[in-house]
Amino acid sequence: MKLFQKSFGGIAGFIGRIWRHRQGRIGLILLIFLSLVAIFAPLIAPYDPYDVTQRADKGLAPSLEHPLGTSITTGQDVFSMLVYGTRVSLLVGLITGIAIALLGSVLGVAAGYLGGAVDMLLMRIVDVMIVIPTLPLTILITNVFGKSYVVIVLVFVLFGWTGLARTVRSLVLRLKNADYVKSAELAGAGRWYVMKTHILPAVSHLVIMSTALSCAGIMIAEAGLSFLGLGNPTAISWGKMLADAQSGGSMLFGQWWTIIAPGIGIFISVFAFMRLGLAIEGIVNPCMKGGSDAKRLLKHIRGRYLDEVLESMEDGAK
Amino acid sequence: MGEMSNRKSEALVKTEHLSVRFPLKRESPFSKRRYVNAVSDVSIEIFKGEAFALVGESGCGKTTLADATLGFAAPSAGEVFFNGEKLDIRNKKRLKQQRRSMQKIFQDPASSMNPRFTVARAVAEPLMIRRELGEKRILSKTAEAIESVGLSSGDLDRFVSEFSGGQQQRIAIARALVSGAEYIVCDEPVSALDVSVHAQILNLLMDIQKERGITYMFISHNLASVRKFADRLAIMYLGRIVEYGDAEKVFANPMHPYTRMLIDSVLSLDGGKTAINAPPEANEALQEEQGLYASNDGGCGFRRRCPIGRSECESIKCSLEKVESDHYTECPYAANR
Ligand SMILES: Nc1ncnc2c1ncn2[C@@H]1O[C@H](COP(=O)(O)OP(=O)(O)O)[C@@H](O)[C@H]1O
Ligand SMILES: [Mg+2]
């Protein structure tokens, strides 16, 4: 019965709504563009930055051969590094974002809906996780388990689910007592019906939105960690490009392009995910104004890694 | 109250010495738990087919009392009966059965229907939950209901959130009709709406009642607005029913000083705003008072605001006393004012 089913109309319908949203379309287009760049990196990049034989002189200025010059420490083609770096950033961002979404929403729903001891236990764990200083611990963990993106993703997920779980929990608590749930209960609805019809769809929209935003946060954090040298040292990522530029003294020699290039990569991808997240929020909560879930989530994401990473970057720059 | 059971119709909803309380946040883990007594010792009967009005200022416990009759608020003392049978919150299966004849129309229509639903889905939800009818029957019943509240069946595939407050309240009413409820709680159904649609919605509710013989518990903080159609009413103050009975008799011969205050304020120029819609600070004071009221069980709850209060009121034990047939009040000094 179409009349009764049309709510937000499945995944295809949801993507359609994002597309029709001005900001959402910008986000989607940029994201598709980034994905294509990541997938077809070998075709787009003029050189293979992983191939030692394709290195040129160090610190060359932009030219026709090297549109963004060459790296000051290794002589790799900066434009090719930028293109290949998309792979690491996007993969780390997406995998972590999705893993956090799964873990955070399952635990958040469990805490909110089951309540009682489950809720108590999970929320105490969250309380503890939130006061743990993440950056020192991340450094510690990568020192113990080796510098790799697998470890970084695991660490991100370990610390990342708490914020989402909390938000989902409070949404579930709110929905559980919503007027329309009461009204459905009066009409004879059971727990499973309420869960399936009224709670999970709203939660899934919140989770999709927060995932878009947390991907943005994670990509920044990943760049930060790579900058601090905690990522896989052999992989080419935007953070590592920044780190190389800094350690080679690009600023000192006026080679600003080696810094601008990865900066633009990070900016575009964060911008894309943010537009997407805000658009989804606009679709899901059409009546919400300014101080919205998205803003709160954003603050939270920033609060975790970015502030610490930014601080240490500032310290490093001094 | 033996006399009431002599009435031709029987009570659909009945509470006996019903109390509902909510725990207050403890100031420290060691301090004693305090409670808000939202509903205290309430015994009322709502007869089949009548419009029963529950009137009192906001925060006095109206919603809690109504929710208790729907099985949403657990009694801390006393009992609720529906159709002569006890309403037991713990007996989920039975409660589900009993609730089939109940519905509630909420103050804020926007929150009473899932904003992600189309009108069709919101209205048809009770039928879809029950899965007793085929799709065709559900669709025709839904269309019929939506037309009976003055909307068109062409609106069925629009989202609920696209409608104005008044229209949303109509949709909510259609939903209650579809569910076939015989007892409908209308919890301040117009107070969140634009003044211009108040009369329309109230008229719609009245027409429906006449047509289908539904029993209403109609909650309002405005005594004047229930005058037109309440058959019987209860005036509530700080969790207690202070005056109760036949609406005509209460309006003709108001006994409790609080009832008189409400009626007087209705007649004054500001449309009753002073006495009834207390400002937020006053409301907090009210809640504080309520806490006090909860802790010492002696004395009349209204004594601080009472124009005819006397020293006995500090320690009096109030209970509803008969004034005339189907007219009761808690104030023993009301008659010789
Ligand atoms: N779920 C709850 N938890 C704690 N206190 C509550 C709850 N619901 C209502 N109360 C308190 O009970 C009192 C009566 O509330 P309510 O029944 O909503 O009043 P009304 O509907 O007349 O405005 C208020 O003091 C309110 O703060
Ligand atoms: Mg209320």
Image: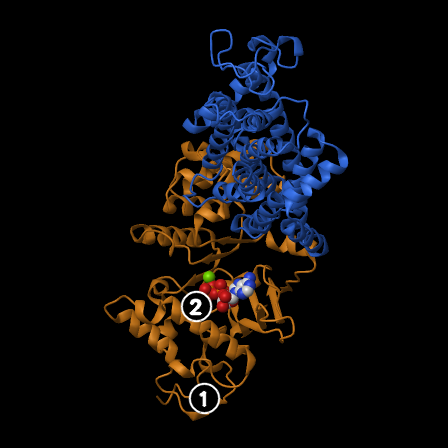
- Which chain is mark 1 on? B
Closer to viewer: mark 1 or mark 2: 1
From mark 1 to mark 2, how far is it between C-alphas?
27 Å
Name the spot of residue B169 as percent of width and height, x first: 42, 47
Helix, strand or loop under label 2: strand
Question: What residue does disc 2 label?
Answer: B232
Number of numbered discs on residues: 2
What chain is the orange one? Answer: B
Name the spot of residue A261 as percent of width and height, x first: 50, 22
Q: Nearer the viewer, residue B76 or A36?
A: A36
Q: Nearer the viewer, residue B298 or B97?
A: B298
Name the spot of residue B95 as percent of width and height, x first: 65, 56
Q: Nearer the viewer, residue A131 or B161?
A: A131
Name the spot of residue A73 as percent of width and height, x first: 59, 21
Residue in view at x 66 percent, y 44 percent = A136
Q: Considering only vertical position in the picture, is A99 above or below A59? A: below
Q: Is residue A13 left or right of residue B254?
A: right
> Which amino acid, mark 1?
Cys
- Which chain is mark 2 on? B
Question: What residue does disc 1 label?
Answer: B313
> Which amino acid, mark 2?
Arg
Helix, strand or loop under label 1: helix
Chain A in the picture: what colour?
blue
Quarter of the figure with residue A194:
top right
Residue B255 in sight in this render:
no
Q: Are dots 1 and 2 in contact, CB under 8 Å?
A: no
Q: Is mark 1 within 8 Å of ligand 1?
A: no
Q: Considering only vertical position in the picture, is A234 above or below B320? A: above
Quarter the C terminus of chain B occupies: bottom left
Q: Is residue B248 left or right of residue A1?
A: left
Residue in view at x 65 percent, y 8 percent = A53
